[in-house]
Amino acid sequence: MKVAVIGMGYVGIPEAVLFTTIPWVQKVYGIQRRSKTSGYKIDLLNSGELPFDEPELEPILRQSVKNKTFECTDDYSKMSDCEIIVVAVQTPVTGGGCVTMKDGTYISKPLLDAIDTIFSSKNMSICEQLIVITSTVAPGTTDRIHERIKQSCAPYTVVHAPERITPKHLVENIQKYPRVIGGYDEESITKVKELYSAIGVKEFVTMTPTEAEITKTSENGMRAVQIAMANQIAEICERTGANFYKVKEGIDSLQGEGITRAMLLPGAGVGGHCLTKDGYLLVSAMDMRDRDRSLFITATTINNSMPNRMWELTKDACKSAGVDINGLNITLFGWSYLKNSSDTRNSPAVAYKEIAERNGCNVYVYDPICKMGKSFKRACESDAFVVVTDHDEFASIFATIHNLRSKKGKPLIFIDGRCVVDPLNFDRNKWVFRGIGRGDVI
Ligand code: SAJ
């Protein structure tokens, strides 16, 4: 059997490479358009290298390139003799990534383009083909594709099997998490189960395609709501002189039968490619008049406001320190959106830096994982230290940073966006501390 995977990203690459380990799969084509931003991946992957850090996957890729079971190509016609086509393109909701249909629902532009190429005559196969949509899509998307198949009498069936991966643990996530499969018939569902069982997936949850779309967009929409709750409770703590982490300890003590509370953590913001968009995809199935008041949109708005909250804390600290914010030298610890990751998609650090520079500050970004800021010495020479990403490798810095002293006779400033230090370690004559959720320390 031959398999094509469209979209060589965080989802498509690991799945395509793992498919090459299946004995009954002779060839896997990684289909990647030669776009400005991602076209480079074609030659990179064909040379046996990954565009991201995933140690477990690299040797499998090299082996599959060597034995020619994997080939990355921009030639979509290679799909025509593939029995299964997996669509793993990104589904952004901003920057023109989304098409709003007549009924107000969304369909991702990259997904639409991928489907159009599958349906185009030069790529259409004569044999029955199974299309597996693994991208996260708005409710109703798979039905739309199913309808198009029926109208065009194309030899396709379609299934939605959304991915559940997070950067840094791609292979582990693919194999560890149950796979939701939304299909129209038992035969196609069984085929998808066979494919993913063969790469290590142990558990499946089957349902209709729309239920699968709502499952995936809800599980991330819910997480964004949970984080937004923590962020809003943290703001209430800051305004009332309370310590969020004591409140969390109190709420977490409410354990027991049926009494469940999942208090996540407030922070400098929510970045990444999942939580920042899946709520929008989910609510696109709501009546357009009701969307803006949806819980998921409100949560995303709260989370997107956190870099500004970090800026407000910076301003307040400067006022307390008697330091002019204009021209302030800031070291920004962290550039990626997620700890121990180099993934900067929608990173709150980018938003904070823009606000600070717009207000006359000089921002030095220090994030060795993102290869930003070469000099730790320079990082220590600022007037203010702002933490957006809590990389493990920063722990030793944060354990002793309170020993730094200003050379300008003014207090230094520390803005803690991830609860990485104990404020009590900071000499209040030499430092002004502000932290998300730390209304008790001003
Ligand atoms: N964050 C908080 N407070 C929290 C947890 C996270 O502010 O309590 C922030 C993080 O700093 C980051 C952002 O939210 O900026 C996203 O963090 P994340 O841990 O949710 O990581 P993601 O965006 O990679 O989310 C993915 C999702 N997985 C899939 O879509 C398959 C999500 O469903 C997972 O729950 C999450 O990974 C995970 O748990 O690792």
Image: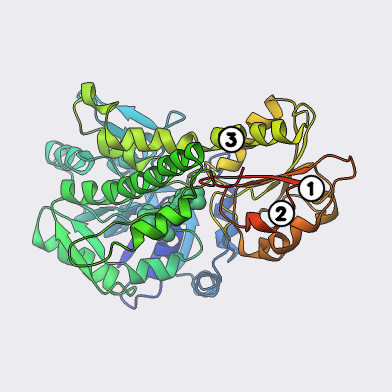
Circle 1 sits on which residue? 430
Front: mark 1 or 3: 1
| Tag 2: amino acid | Phe
Residue 174 is drawn in which quadrant? bottom left
Disc 3 designates what residue?
A: 351
Q: Mark 1 or mark 3, which has the lower sequence index?
A: 3
Note whether residue 98 is visible: yes
* Vertical comparison of 319 with 343: above or below: above
Q: Amino acid at mark 1?
A: Lys
Specify the quadrant that holds the N terminus. bottom left
Q: Nearer the viewer, residue 202 or 116?
A: 202
Q: What label does residue 426 carry, if any?
A: 2
Secondary structure beneath dot 3 equals: helix
User: What residue occupies the far bottom of the structure in this picture?
Assistant: 23
Estimate the x, y position of residue 209 in percent, counting from the top left. Answer: 17, 49
Amino acid type shown at disc 3: Ala
Q: Position of residue 323 (x, y in %)?
A: 78, 32
Instruction: Name the residue located 85 percent from the left edge and 54 percent from the top edge.
Output: 377
Q: Give residue 233's quadrant in the image.
A: top left
> Does the CB distance between marks 1 and 2 fall below 8 Å?
yes
Under circle 2, the secondary element is loop
Left or right placement of residue 308 versus residue 385 in this view: left
Residue 11 showing in the rendered view: no
Q: Earlier in the sequence, mark 2 or mark 3?
A: 3
Q: Residue at x 29, y 54 (%)?
A: 162
Q: Dot 2: within a 10 Å radius of its alpha carbon, few (fewer than 14), some, or many (20 or more) residues?
A: some
Vertical side of 210 occupied by 424: above or below: below
How many neighbours does mark 1 have within 10 angstroms: few (below 14), some (14-19), or many (20 or more)?
some
Task: Give the image's coloring scheme.
Answer: rainbow
| Mark 1 vs mark 3, CA separation in Å | 28 Å
Q: Which of 269/275 is in front?
A: 269
Q: Disc 1 on helix, strand or loop?
A: loop
